[in-house]
Structures are given as structure tokens and as C-alpha cells.
Image (spheres, rainbow, N blue to C red):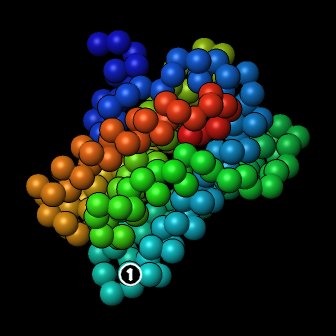
Amino acid sequence: MSASRRHLEGLPLVRPTSPAWARVAAANLDALLADHAHCELKAASMALSLAGRHCDRADLVRRMTSLAHEELRHFERVRRLLAERGRGLPRMQADPYVVRLRQALRSGSDPLTGQLLACLFVEARSCERFRILAEERRVPPALRALYRELASAEARHHEVFLRLAVAETGEERARRLVEAAAEREAEIARELPVEPRMH
Ligand SMILES: [Fe+2]
Ligand SMILES: [Fe+2]
């Protein structure tokens, strides 16, 4: 199996990240880490927002609050890494991948399921990219170890959102929605410029 196919294993993604991305990311680690730190913070914030808006769903609230805790711990680790490299946290930038993904998945399903699918794909794409970085020789070994660990976390997180989507809409419909969403996600990922960002 090719490396790019291996990086997609167990994930719903249908197209691997462009090989050019690893080079750009490894050559701009400070920018990548800054974007990554914000992604962790946004993931925590999104999980809390879902829990707050759907507080009648006990399972969702439990899973989302636990996810928010974990994402905040990730944020703190990446923020500390940036500080060790003499970098502060720059202002948060818009994330066109997430914006476009959420827009694309909003239609054709109920709003909660659309949001769960968007989160599922953000986690899945992050997992693929952490796997790539974990094997990228131009990335320092200590950072590669962190990326390996985060790749496992993201694989787990994508399953959390999959389980919630199945609970929301049923196994068969969730499977069809994930398949359709995977095509849209691949288009969005392909159309975006290759930058030192997580998505
Ligand atoms: Fe995370
Ligand atoms: Fe995550």
C-alpha cells in the first residue's frame, strides 16, 4: 500500500492530501504550529457550543464536554511548544476549509447532523495530516512523536462524531451522508491553496 493510501486507513476521506503540503508544512513549522494551536482551541469551542445547543442529549453533552477538555489540553501543549520556539500565539485567522465544509454539509440534512459531519471530517483530515507529519523526515523527531500521538486522538475523535451522527440519523442514512460528504470534502481540500495550515 502506498504511503498516501496508508495515511487514509480507517478514515472516510476519499482523496489524500497533496504531497506538496508536507514540504510546505515542514518548511514553515512556526506558521503550522500557530494554525494548529488555533485549530485545537476552535475544536474545544465547537464541542462546547454543540453541548450547549443540544443540552437535552445526555450522550452528546458527555462526549462533547470530554472532547473539549482533551482539545484544550492539546491547545496548551501546542501553545507551550510555540513559546519554547520563542513564538507567541498570533491572531486567529479565518479557516476557509472549515467555513466551506460547514456550508457544504449544511444542506441536505438536518442542522445537527450536518454539523456532526463537518466536525467528523475536520477530525479525519487532521488525522491524515498528523500521520503525514509524523513520518515527515524534515520535521524534528520530538514534534513527529507529538504528531503521532495526535493522529491517534483525531482518529478517535472522528469516530465520536460518527457515532453521534449514527445516533442522530440511523446507520444506513449516516453511511450515505458520510459517503456524499467525503466527495464534497475532497473537492474543498483540493481547491484550497497549499499552505502551512492544518487544513
Ligand atoms: Fe486535538
Ligand atoms: Fe480532535
Q: Residue at x 59, y 22 (%)?
A: 22
Q: Residue at x 28, y 64 (%)?
A: 109
**Residue 121 vs residue 187, the one in the foreground:** 187
Q: Label 1 is placed on what type of residue?
A: His
Question: For residue 194, which quarter of the picture?
Answer: top right
- The quarter of the image holding the C terminus is top right
Q: Position of residue 164 (x, y in %)?
A: 28, 64
- Residue 79 in the figure: left or right of residue 13: right
Q: Is residue 75 above or below residue 199?
A: below
Q: Residue at x 37, y 28 (%)?
A: 15
Question: For residue 171, which quarter of the picture?
Answer: bottom left
Q: Is residue 21 above or below residue 92?
A: above
- The quarter of the image holding the N terminus is top left
Question: For residue 182, which quarter of the picture?
Answer: top left
Q: Position of residue 143 (x, y in %)?
A: 64, 31
- Direction front: furthest residue: 107
- Direction right: furthest residue: 86
Q: Residue at x 49, y 30 (%)?
A: 190
Q: Position of residue 150 (x, y in %)?
A: 50, 42
Q: Is residue 169 above or below residue 78?
A: below
Q: Number of marks in the image?
A: 1
Residue bearing the label numbered 1? 54
Q: Residues within 10 Å of mark 1 (few under 14, many from 20)?
A: few
- Direction bottom: furthest residue: 56
- Residue 147 in the figure: left or right of residue 139: left
